[in-house]
Amino acid sequence: MLQTADYARAIISASPKFTSSEDIEKGVEHRLKRQALITHKTNAVELDVMLHVSVLYWTLGGPNVMAGALRHLAEMSKYPNITIRVRPYSAGLTWGLPHGSFILLGSD
């Protein structure tokens, strides 16, 4: 939900599930459409994200892609409906890390 197009493209390209450039671009488009749910001026969805500090050090897509992704995270954190927290190494094992991400959905 917080990825740039280039960062999403780098992640999707690494998956064996997406083999053609058309599939990769569809995946990128899908991720950017989801992002619109949190950046829309009216009726934006609240997003509370916890990132493990390690993702800030990955170099997916090269240094320029990562620089853009980190700038994008900083900009997204300025939205009033978006909270971004970073879990440090010192916090120990994060539940989702060995098995991938997890999402909790809820309503007020």
Image (cartoon, grey):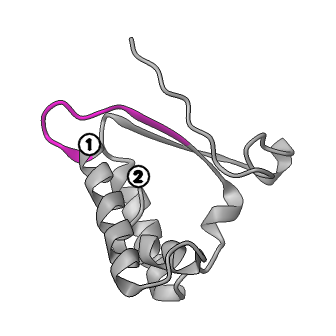
Q: Would you call the spot at circle 1 few (<14 residues within 10 Å), some (14-19), or many (20 or more)?
A: some
Q: Would you call the spot at circle 2 few (<14 residues within 10 Å), some (14-19), or many (20 or more)?
A: some
- 1 shown above or below 108: below
Give the overall secondary structure of the magenta segment: loop
* The label number, if any, that marks residue 46 in the structure image: none
Q: Within the magenta stretch, is there residue 44?
A: yes
Query: Mark 2 sits on what residue?
Result: 1
Residue for point 40% across, 16% down: 107
Q: Nearer the viewer, residue 62 or 27?
A: 27
Residue segment shown in magenta: 39-49
* The label number, if any, that marks residue 37 in the structure image: 1
Identify the mark nearer the N-term, 1 or 2.
2
Residue for point 33% across, 76% down: 25
Query: How far across and down, in percent of the image, does residue 62 sit?
Result: 54, 88
Kindly indicate whether the residue at mark 2 contacts the one at mark 1 (C-beta within 8 angstroms). Answer: yes
Residue for point 39% across, 11% down: 108
The kind of residue tagged 2 is Met
Query: How far across and down, in percent of the image, does residue 56 sit?
Result: 61, 65
